[in-house]
Image (spheres, helix red, strand yellow):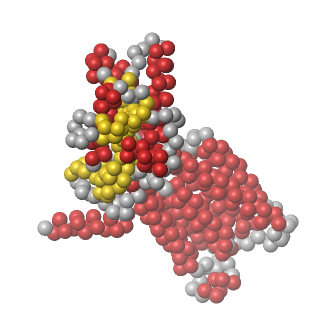
Amino acid sequence: MSVSLARRCLDMLKLLLFGETAPLEMPMRVSAAIERQQAQSEILIGWVQLGVVIVFGTLYALSPKTFDMDVMIAPVPWALAAYLAFTVVRLSLGYRDALTRWFLTLSVIIDMALLMGLIWSFHIQYEQPVAFVLKVPTLLYVFIFIALRALRFDAFFVLLSGLIAAVGWLLMLVISLAEGTSEITRDFVLYMISTQILLGAEFDKIMSILVVTMILALAIVRARRLLVRSIAEGAAAADLSRFFAPEIADQITQSEIRIEPGHGELVEAAVLFCDIRGFTQLAAEQPPDAVMMLLAEYEARMGNTIQNHSGSIDKYLGDGIMATFGVAPKSVTWAADALRAVDELVSVSEHWQRERLDSGLRPLEIGFAVAKGPVIFGAVGDPNRLEYTVIGDAVNLAAKLEKHNKVAGAVALTTSAAYREARAQGYVPPGNRRELEEANVAGVEQSIGLIILAE
């Protein structure tokens, strides 16, 4: 019992410190996306470093010098020149995606080594004891170098940078003590105005470096987990969006509440059905790959046209397509959009048939039908598997009208009510339309008025 309690407490502590765990196994495309993100971060780091060098170099060149110009060594220009050269090489490798992990590790070491070497050289430049360098404000640049590593979202380089900085400053303290020219003091004022050494102050600096490093590293671990989860979920959402109409995918991802079965809304909409006639026999005569390639081409041609007219693909039904207008996205010209889509679909279909004939292939007959009315748009299924769809008389009627094309000798049909609604919404037919005032449609109890959109 105590072991179980301790494990739960440990898990809670891990969750508090590091956040939710990232997926242990990620698809290659997700790992590749994270690597691309890190490669871009390394380029950003290179540009920031280049900017730092330019700014510091400019300030050094313009500012009045605080040391005797006759000294034998002026280390700042040399350190800046070396750092500039290394930064240019690093940036070049970043753009060529050639920054290996060992080189990045070396980069962190060189960054800190150059900074610590520069600080150490000040006692030579100013002709002072080594302990003199313990007072220079250049130590603050350490935090810039540590913070730069955070841009990669990799805690290892933050920890490495902070650890090298802390060890470097500790070595600086040891060298100062070993030189023997500076005494240890407990007088803070004397420490500030002389080259004497206050051990507590130096340990405070080292602890500050380590604490800042640990906080940044912890933040990076949490941020990286969030980054991994975000990229994984983003990749999953991108993959899932291929199985949904873009409008439906947006509705799902932007929903402020968790979508559950039974959630729906009543909307006035137009429903479109497309269907290849005689497809069953055609499929039986063709190899499976040829059938699937034909369907892919058919769905691409029809689907693009539907979406270009603000239609949303509800589902692919083998050789059939069901689409809606005015559901997602909402539109005030949904009926007009549907009939404009049919006009173009007929044109696209005729052009495709000519292409097939010219290629010596069997032409396809495709039928279209549109009905309008109130439909319920929402999620159906169980909590583990949901599907967005539309339900209503308009859906059933559109399917029956498409089958009635053959009876009416038509390519595309719609109801008189849908046609009037479309005209009221601004639809202008490209030519005269033939009306069937009292048509008996199989499965529909009463006769209805129909408009032939194409024959």
- The residue depicted at 23 percent of the width and 66 percent of the height is 8
Asked if residue 180 shows in the view, the reply is yes
Residue 252 found in image quarter: bottom left
Residue 413 found in image quarter: top left
Residue that sits furthest to the top in the current view: 360
- The residue depicted at 57 percent of the width and 40 percent of the height is 98
Up/down of 424 relative to 56, above or below: above
Tell me the quadrant of the picture where the N terminus can be found: bottom left
Q: Position of residue 266 (x, y in %)?
A: 32, 57
Viewer-proximal residue among 269 and 25:
269
Up/down of 254 relative to 422, above or below: below
Viewer-proximal residue among 378 and 6:
378
Asked if residue 302 shows in the view, the reply is no
Residue that sits furthest to the right in the current view: 70
Q: Position of residue 170 (x, y in %)?
A: 55, 67
Q: Position of residue 314 (x, y in %)?
A: 35, 43
Tell me the quadrant of the picture where the C terminus can be found: top left
Q: Position of residue 453 (x, y in %)?
A: 43, 34
- The residue depicted at 39 percent of the width and 45 percent of the height is 418
So how many labels did they put on this image? Answer: 0
Left-right relation of 417 to 73: left
Residue 175 found in image quarter: bottom right
Viewer-proximal residue among 314 and 341:
341
Left-right relation of 410 to 112: left
Up/down of 4 relative to 41, above or below: below
- The residue depicted at 39 percent of the width and 36 percent of the height is 435
Residue that sits furthest to the front in the current view: 437
